Amino acid sequence: MNFTDYYLAKKLKEQKAKYRYEIARSTMEYDRFQFLLKNKRNPNSDGWSIYFIPRPVEWSGSERPDMAFTKRSENISSIVFPEPGIPYGYGDVKGTNDSLIVLLNEDFRIQGISEIEIFIARGQKHNRKNLWYELVDGELEYELDFLRQSAKELPIAS
């Protein structure tokens, strides 16, 4: 298996923060996220959250990311969506050798982003594009379903 960890982030309808998503399910084993995503204050002070924000248009790197995961002042990962209209992206976790694959809700272009699935592949930083190609070709469904089923539901206080 390529992927080791899973997080499901959901946008709460009653939430006023435009880019904040609450972590609703997780395999709860990725230490980097366990530390970064824990909320320290309201709303949902006992839960976890993440911000999914647009990246600046001007970018000096070789690959211009479309979005980024952040928490407080920490940039966790920049995310590239290689094909517009396809809800699959990839990135790596800053400060690690880990990659991640991101799946948005299928109707994101109509309804906006309401759910984000994050799949982490430890030690696969340099393989992130290949993992994305495998995802697009439908070769990773078994792995993704296994992690989804292994995840635990987390309490979300509104």
Image (cartoon, rainbow, N blue to C red):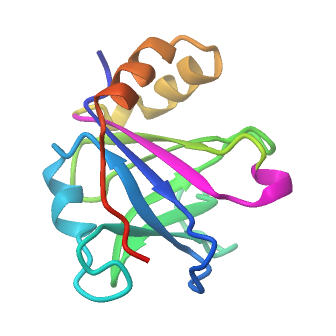
Vertical placement of residue 23 versus 147, above or below: below
Give x and y (percent) for residue 53: 57, 72
Q: Is residue 108 left or right of residue 27?
A: right
Q: How many marks?
A: 0
Residue at 36% over, 34% down: 126
Foreground: 21 or 120? 21
Q: Residue furthest right?
A: 110
Please provide percent x and percent y for residue 35. 16, 65
Q: Nearer the viewer, residue 144 or 66?
A: 144
Q: Does 146 sit above or below residue 49?
A: above
> In x, y percent, where is residue 5?
28, 37
Q: Would residue 139 be visible to someone looking at this image?
A: yes
Q: Nearer the viewer, residue 139 or 21?
A: 21
Image quarter in which the C terminus is found: bottom left
Residue 49 position by quadrant: bottom left
**Residue drawn at the location 41% of the way across and 68% of the way down:** 50
Q: Quadrant of residue 145?
A: top left
Q: From the viewer's perspective, is 72 left or right of 62?
A: left
Whether residue 5 sits left or right of residue 141 in the image: it is left
Within the magenta stretch, is there residue 120?
yes
Tell me: residue 152, above or below residue 134: below
Query: Residue 101 in magenta?
Result: no
Picture quadrant where residue 150 is located? top left
Magenta residues, as a range? 108-122
Residue occupying image coordinates x 30% and y 67%: 48
Q: Nearer the viewer, residue 64 or 50?
A: 50
Q: Inspect this view and state whether residue 63 appears.
A: no
